[in-house]
Image: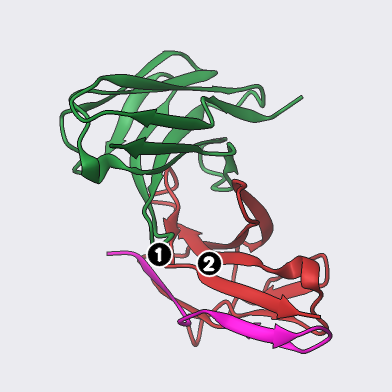
Chain colours: A green, B red
Amino acid sequence: DTAVSQTPKYLVTQMGNDKSIKCEQNLGHDTMYWYKQDSKKFLKIMFSYNNKELIINETVPNRFSPKSPDKAHLNLHINSLELGDSAVYFCASSQAQVGEAFFGQGTRLTVV
Amino acid sequence: GNSVTQMEGPVTLSEEAFLTINCTYTATGYPSLFWYVQYPGEGLQLLLKATKADDKGSNKGFEATYRKETTSFHLEKGSVQVSDSAVYFCALTTPQGAQKLVFGQGTRLTINP
């Protein structure tokens, strides 16, 4: 019954590897997001998709590539992982023009 | 651009104390304002919201009033509990940028018994 679910919850990987985080929402929302939370808890948007179309890409390195196969899914693929990519990544969804977003439980990525 | 500024944390209070976490914003147009809460090890949950000036959002004993004249949305609770210990985020969206939330830096609240 989870509204926004993302997997995995924890991800530990070595520098240079490629990894993916998956996100699914069952709320019928048309907009999905990826946010990054750094070690100081600061939250910043990375990407936003509306009806599978990319509408926000906030100066994120090209190594990060979101993919939205349908309105209910937004995955995040990261190539050539770096130490600085270590953070908690949150998926969220909302209905456009409403603003209120629902968040997943987060994926804690640790690059060693 | 749009931005949100919260009071610096961490904030430590005793149980049953009165809580205020200040939040001010800068935005073009008329933003919607939110407070989100993040309990340890969890994602963010919407705590309350207000979509127009003078609206008051409330939930679980928390309140915040949308003050356009002071561009503020301060969070208050009359009597905090240990279970309120969490990180609190003030955030906004605007009609122009309704596709994303702009967050403040978060305020860590610890309530001691």
Q: Percent x, y for residue B28? A: 35, 66
Task: Tell me: A92 left or right of B17.
Answer: left
Q: Nearer the viewer, mark 1 or mark 2?
A: 2
For the point 56% across and 71% down, the residue is B108
Which image quarter: residue B38?
bottom right
Label 1 CA crowd tier, 10 Å (few <14, some 14–19, many 20+): few
For the point 15% across and 29% down, the residue is A62
Mark count: 2
Asked whether B104 or B54 is in front, the reply is B104
Task: Tell me: B25 left or right of A15.
Answer: right
Task: Tell me: B83 left or right of B73.
Answer: right
Q: Mark 1 sits on what residue?
A: B29
For the point 79% across and 79% down, the residue is B80
Region in magenta: B1-21
Asked whether B28 or A14 is in front, the reply is A14
Q: Percent x, y for residue A9? A: 54, 31
**In the rendering, which numbered label is found on residue B52?**
none
**In the rendering, which numbered label is found on residue B90?**
2
Can residue B65 be seen here? The reply is no
Residue B2 belongs to magenta span? yes
Q: Percent x, y for residue A16? A: 18, 25
